[in-house]
Amino acid sequence: MFTGLVETTGEVAALEPAGAGVRLVVRAPEIAADVRIGDSIAVNGCCLTAVSQDAGTVGFDLLQETLDRTSLAAAKRGSVVNLERALSAHARLGGHFVQGHVDCASAILEFEEHGADRRLEIELPREFAQYVAFKGSIAIDGISLTVAEVNDASFAVWIIPHTFQVTNLGTRKAEDRVNLEFDMLAKYVERILAVKNR
């Protein structure tokens, strides 16, 4: 479980074939020394298991399902990724409940400056539209954000300067794909109602 409050960013150091998948190695000196093999870490919002670790890097194995569903398939050496370690029981929950189970990767339609802030508009696939609500929570590349607009085929959020500076959003532009995780409470409500109405 995560909060969507990005701890730090890392840089992709290597992408290497590993069995049927890929070994992703991330240079992350701020957290690597404290990571243990088996720890869960959200990488661009995708919950991954640390399988290697040294003083400056952490390695993860990406299975085909992860490559098919997330934007990590497009990562390359030097890509900047958002990192968050799993929530500890005694920590403050400042964002919202984020599982690290990415629903889809979707394209940025617009990313524009408006004074000190930025408006980020993202394509909203029809099959997930019911999970997006005005003023609701959404995780974009693992960042907990509030939905400011809901349109027919897109939604928009506003990015404050702090979020822009401490996440990978400074490297993002129109047409880039970002990982989306929709609010899990909405999914449970949908499931409960579907079962009750059978």
Image (cartoon, rainbow, N blue to C red):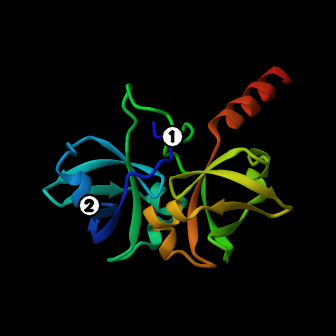
Quarter occupied by the N terminus:
top left
Q: What is the residue that sits farthest to the top in this orientation?
A: 196
Q: What mark, if any, has residue 153 been given in the picture?
A: none
> Dot 1 surroundings within 10 Å: few (below 14), some, or many (20 or more)?
many
Q: Earlier in the sequence, mark 1 or mark 2?
A: 2
Determine the secondary structure under disc 2: loop
Horizontal arrangement in the rendering, residue 107 relative to residue 164 (left or right): right
From the image, tell me which residue sits under label 2: 28
Residue 152 horizontal/vertical position (percent)? 86, 62
Looking at the image, residue 25 lies above or below residue 74: above
Residue 192 horizontal/vertical position (percent)? 74, 25
User: Which residue lies at the image location 68% right of the left edge and 30% below the top edge?
Assistant: 188
User: Which residue lies at the image location 46% right of the left edge and 40% below the top edge?
Assistant: 2
Determine the secondary structure under disc 1: loop
| Marks 1 and 2 in Cβ contact (< 8 Å) | no
Looking at the image, residue 158 lies above or below residue 198: below
> Dot 2 surroundings within 10 Å: few (below 14), some, or many (20 or more)?
many
Q: Quadrant of residue 60?
A: bottom left
Residue 130 horizontal/vertical position (percent)? 79, 46
Quarter occupied by the C terminus:
top right
Inspect the image, locate mark 2, and give the three-letter code of the amino acid beneath it.
Answer: Ala
From the image, tell me which residue sits under label 1: 99
